[in-house]
């Protein structure tokens, strides 16, 4: 009982009278909780090739004040003599690892840091070392001391996001903010919460004369993301797009290669002409750019009319000389300067020859008294509906509305041939993919997952079949 009472008394004494003393000791011997960074997940191609990965790079610094102080209070390095005796061989070795600097330049640079007594002196400004280079440096004389406190060598690693295939699908994969290790755009940002992982916690405890890391919570590394991109297809699409843009001196171009049944995006290329005359990926135009779709919109217009039953594939329009006055403005076919077609074209031929006059006449005649029915039809077939892809900056289609202050008598006719509407390329691709997919519209997929159906049937099977045949003729016999 006496022993128990003594223990309890001692415990109370420690908790009260000696509380301040032991709290201060804890601050000295145990450092506050520190973050343990998780490894960011990789982004892989559809066939398992590495497209984006976090690979460490390094900066090495020298602390020229790590030794102590002499009687004149001038800081000195405990290994000064060793430093100078190894300096020449160090500089020769650094030159072999970083050939951009000569041994003489390295020597001049390091001696400058030693004279200044710098605490955090970068041994190679402007260079970040790869893992192999870092290991080579650490094997050099002086850097290979086991006790880094004596040598003053300070190593600062950083996770650096690398793309093994260079600029291939650069904007789709996305960018990071470098040292901040935070996502900036593309898939990196869209799936950041999965790729990032969960940080852990650690604290440092002083044992004898050295601090030891003690893990309180293990970091959970980020998940790997398997994209739908096929590297070979992506390379072909980018190269072909670049070559053809040069031929026609285009300012901007997009290619989207979509797998019909699944919606998987196998390639997506976005190129823009820069001041130097070359083409680079500047932004994800395929997802974020709103643009008038032009003649690609005629297919949507004709499908609405076919599905509403106001026209049939056999209906004809006499396009005459290729010029027609509509509500005070001239509608022109592409060949009007050559006299036009001077004949009646059926719906299939209107598509084959991409006739502005033929398309606008069919739509204006059948929806002029009720344009809202046409606008509703565009929504029904899916081309005017948001795709809700998980990308920041993703643009939604903008279809001209009949209650808009910009609606005019000519709006319906010009809408039908792809003007007065703004559609991102990905929405146009999804619409055409639905026609190829027997009318089933699937959501474009950038990562491996289950196919998501947006619209089970955008139009009747008969009308989808008619458009498919018209599109085949358009490719084989049309413009």
Image (cartoon, rainbow, N blue to C red):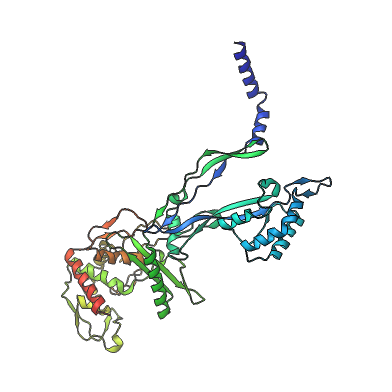
Q: Where's residue 222, x and y in %?
A: 45, 49
What is the quadrant of residue 352 in the picture? Answer: bottom left
Q: Pick the residue in front: 55 or 286.
A: 55
Q: Quadrant of the N terminus?
A: top right
- Left or right: residue 144 versus residue 372 is right
Q: Residue at x 45, y 54 (%)?
A: 42
Q: Is residue 150 above or below residue 454?
A: above
Residue for point 72% across, 47% down = 66
Residue 472 percent coordinates (x, y):
23, 73
Q: Is residue 415 visible?
A: no
| Residue nearer the viewer, 183 or 93 | 93
Q: In which quadrant will I find the C terminus?
A: bottom left
**Quarter where residue 355 is shown:** bottom left
Task: Please provide percent x and percent y for residue 243.
Answer: 41, 76
Q: Is residue 48 above or below residue 414?
A: above
Name the residue rendered at 39%, 59% in the picture. 45
Residue at the farthest bottom position: 338
Query: Is residue 469 visible to us here?
Result: yes
Q: How many marks?
A: 0
Picture coordinates of residue 271, whole percent (x, y) = 43, 70
- Is 296 on the left or on the right of 244, as rendered? left
4 or 298, nearer to the observer:
4
């Amino acid at each position: 009982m006496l022993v128990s009472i003594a223990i309890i008394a001692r415990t109370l004494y420690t908790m009260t009278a000696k509380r301040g003393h032991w709290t201060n000791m804890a601050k000295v011997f145990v450092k506050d909780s520190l973050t343990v960074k998780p490894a960011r997940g990789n982004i892989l191609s559809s066939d398992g090739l590495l497209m984006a990965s976090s690979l460490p790079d390094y900066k090495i610094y020298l602390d020229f004040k790590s030794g102590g102080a002499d009687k004149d209070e001038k800081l000195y390095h405990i290994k000064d003599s060793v430093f100078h005796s190894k300096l020449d061989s160090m500089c020769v070795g650094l030159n072999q690892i970083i050939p951009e600097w000569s041994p003489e330049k390295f020597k001049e640079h390091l001696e400058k840091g030693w004279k200044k007594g710098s605490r955090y002196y970068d041994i190679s400004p402007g260079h970040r070392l790869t893992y192999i280079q870092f290991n080579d440096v650490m094997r050099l004389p002086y850097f290979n001391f086991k006790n880094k406190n004596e040598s003053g060598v300070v190593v600062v690693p950083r996770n650096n996001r690398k793309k093994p295939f260079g600029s291939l699908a650069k904007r789709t994969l996305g960018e990071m903010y470098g040292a901040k290790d935070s996502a900036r755009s593309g898939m990196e940002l869209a799936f950041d919460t999965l790729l990032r992982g969960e940080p852990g916690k650690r604290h440092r405890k002083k044992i004898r004369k050295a601090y030891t890391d003690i893990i309180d919570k293990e970091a959970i590394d980020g998940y790997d993301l398997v994209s739908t991109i096929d590297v070979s297809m992506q390379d072909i699409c980018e190269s072909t797009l670049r070559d053809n843009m040069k031929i026609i001196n285009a300012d901007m171009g997009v290619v989207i290669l979509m797998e019909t049944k699944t919606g998987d995006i196998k390639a997506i290329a976005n190129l823009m002409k820069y001041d130097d005359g070359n083409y680079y990926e500047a932004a994800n135009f395929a997802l974020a750019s709103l643009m008038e779709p032009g003649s690609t919109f005629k297919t949507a217009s004709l499908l609405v009319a076919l599905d509403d039953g106001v026209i049939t594939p056999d209906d004809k329009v006499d396009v005459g000389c290729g010029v027609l006055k509509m509500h005070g403005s001239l509608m022109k076919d592409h060949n009007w300067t050559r006299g036009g077609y001077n004949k009646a074209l059926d719906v299939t031929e209107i598509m084959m020859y991409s006739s502005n006059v033929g398309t606008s006449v069919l739509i204006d005649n059948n929806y002029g008294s009720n344009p809202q029915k046409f606008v509703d039809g565009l929504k029904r077939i899916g081309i005017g509906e948001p795709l809700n892809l998980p990308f920041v900056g993703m643009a939604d289609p903008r279809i001209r509305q009949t209650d808009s202050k910009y609606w005019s008598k000519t709006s319906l006719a010009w809408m039908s041939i792809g003007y007065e509407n703004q559609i991102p390329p990905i929405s146009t691709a999804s619409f055409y993919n639905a026609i190829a997919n027997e009318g089933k519209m699937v959501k474009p997929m950038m990562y491996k997952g289950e196919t998501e159906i947006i619209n089970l049937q955008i139009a009747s099977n008969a009308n989808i079949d008619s458009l498919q045949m018209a599109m085949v003729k358009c490719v084989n016999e049309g413009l």
